Image (spheres, rainbow, N blue to C red):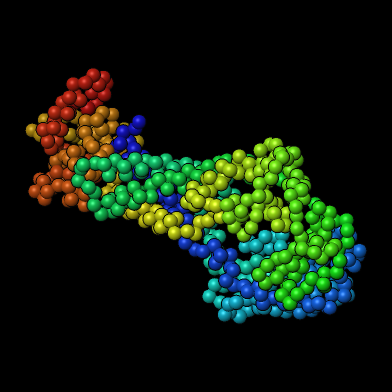
Amino acid sequence: MPSIRTIRNLHRWLALLIGVQLFLWSLSGLYMVVTDIDFIHGDHLLEPGRAPTLQTGTIAYDMDKLLKDYPAAEQVRLQASAQGPFYSLRHHGEKLRISALNGSPMALLSEQDASKVATQVYTGTGQISDARLFSEEAPAEVSPRLLPLWQINFNDAGNSSLYVSAIEGRVVTKRHTGWRLFDVMWMLHIMDYDSRENIHNLLLQSLATLGLITALMGAILAWRGLRSRNQAPKGWQRLHLWLGAIVGLQFILWLGSGLALSLLDEDWLDGNRARLRPSTAFTTPPRAVSELLGPSTHSVELSGILNRPVYQLQQLEQQPLYWADTLTPLTLDKAQLRQLAAASIESPLELGIDLLPGDETGYPDTPTVARFVARDGTRILLDAGNGRILEQQTAGSDLKSVLMMMHFMDYMPGDGIHFNHLPIRLLAILTLLLSISGWVLVFRQLKAGQYRLTLPGRGSRFEVRDRDGTLLGHFDSHGSNLLDSINHQTEWLLTQCGGGGSCGLCVLKCSEPPPANDKEKALLRPSRLEQGLRLACQHSHGSGYYQLASPAQARHWLTQARLPLGDQALDVID
């Protein structure tokens, strides 16, 4: 195992090399866990209940007529608007708007209508400042798959933007200053400065590896420092030591789990990689949806399950499903659930079904989860109420869940993995303080000249003498301080702290003493400082020569000089 001096030096140099990124990881991580994710999503900007509702008797062009005119229609949605009810759908890859009053195609939503849609659901205090239509290229903050869409900007404190689909006539996403800052923090966190999506980039993997090594070395130094009987460090070094001891383990888990997620193959970690897309086709025609409309229905979506049409109503607080061919509430038995699970994977299913509470499987909003197991070991989870595939679980996805659990510090994730809880927020604050205290120590060491790279044969030489003035040897400047230079090949000076400035065993008398730093003032008496005594680990060579300060140092030096050192002795012992 490397000596404590080597570990300390490597830790110091690595902190200088990747300290900025360690700080950015701490800062970005703190912002993301402290800021509520619902706020980031912009949920505070909308009140969906304000959207217009569908009225019975206004739908003259019903679903069955629509499907006759557009037999390849997909993603059919009926909703209300100021111009009356209309359908949004995709037909042969083209997005269309069709009037539910007379079946005629409708133009894209106008700026006036898009602004009205946005203001109907907007809960803020601002006014619309401008509106812009995006048809070909989406702004960087939204997905291109939402095109065409209107960007409706408000002059509120958060510079909020509501994006209204020019086809569907509804708000499809929202952005504000908090979200945009979150996006910047995410970019800094994963170090993808281009797409802000790739967590598998080489830069992240390289610095995460160095960061993990730095954290492991820091944990060793913290553990040794707390166990040491030497005088305890003070000030920023003491704060850094204690913070390292408190958050060190979790900091290592953060770096280790993040590195693993970056290095492992994303497809292998994805349990849904082999998932088959279920068919939404149906063979029986749907009945008129008007009979289901109530006073609080905002929209209706048409899909298919097991070759039967299904209506999903979007109401204020619920989304009930009905068989569209009978207009009865959708229910599924075990055989039907098994049929849906079997259609989602190529591997045959094993016998049996497990019906589990949703809050025990990571789906607290789902009352009952049906679980099936395929012969290849894949577990298929379905919502037992509506037959929707929730996820497929494999060995890779299980490992990903464990890594995410460690990364988010959510060690009881029965209701899903969360990262806005109190423990992670407290640890994130302490980790940021750890990073700040580390940078303070780095700046102090830079100021003291302890970050110097000296090429072989290019450094200055200095003398070390015995207490009586007898010359013990000439040394070339190596490393960042006198202790490293003297002990470069042989440990002439013993220490317990490895150069941390806490044990005092490397004290030397300087013929031209440099100014004493805080560690020396705390460790050495004023009278000894006035005599020119300084810690070799705290200073680089300036000018003059250096003398041993204690009989114990002289005895150890003599012992080392008597060892069979070979050619090394010719350079040191004159």
| Residue 481 can be seen, yes or no | no
The N terminus - image quarter? top left
Residue 425, quarter of picture: bottom left
- Which residue sits at x=68%, y=67%? 318
In the figure, is residue 483 to the left or right of 319? left
Residue 377, quarter of picture: top right
- Which residue sits at x=70%, y=60%? 144
Judge by depth and name the residue closer to the eye, 422 or 458: 422
Residue 216, quarter of picture: top left
Position in image of residue 399 (x %, y %): 56, 42
In the rendered image, the vertical position of residue 406 relative to residue 169, given as above or below: above
| Residue 325 can be seen, yes or no | yes
In the figure, is residue 544 to the left or right of 1? left
- Which residue sits at x=24%, y=49%? 233
In the figure, is residue 99 to the left or right of 113? right
In the rendered image, the vertical position of residue 563 relative to residue 87, given as above or below: above
In the figure, is residue 525 to the left or right of 127? left
- Which residue sits at x=27%, y=51%? 238
In the rendered image, the vertical position of residue 36 relative to residue 82, given as above or below: above
Residue furthest to the right in view is 68
Judge by depth and name the residue closer to the eye, 85 or 21: 85
Position in image of residue 337 (x %, y %): 74, 50
Position in image of residue 570 (x %, y %): 23, 23
Position in image of residue 385 (x %, y %): 70, 57
Total numbered labels: 0
Judge by depth and name the residue closer to the eye, 481 or 38: 38
The C terminus - image quarter? top left
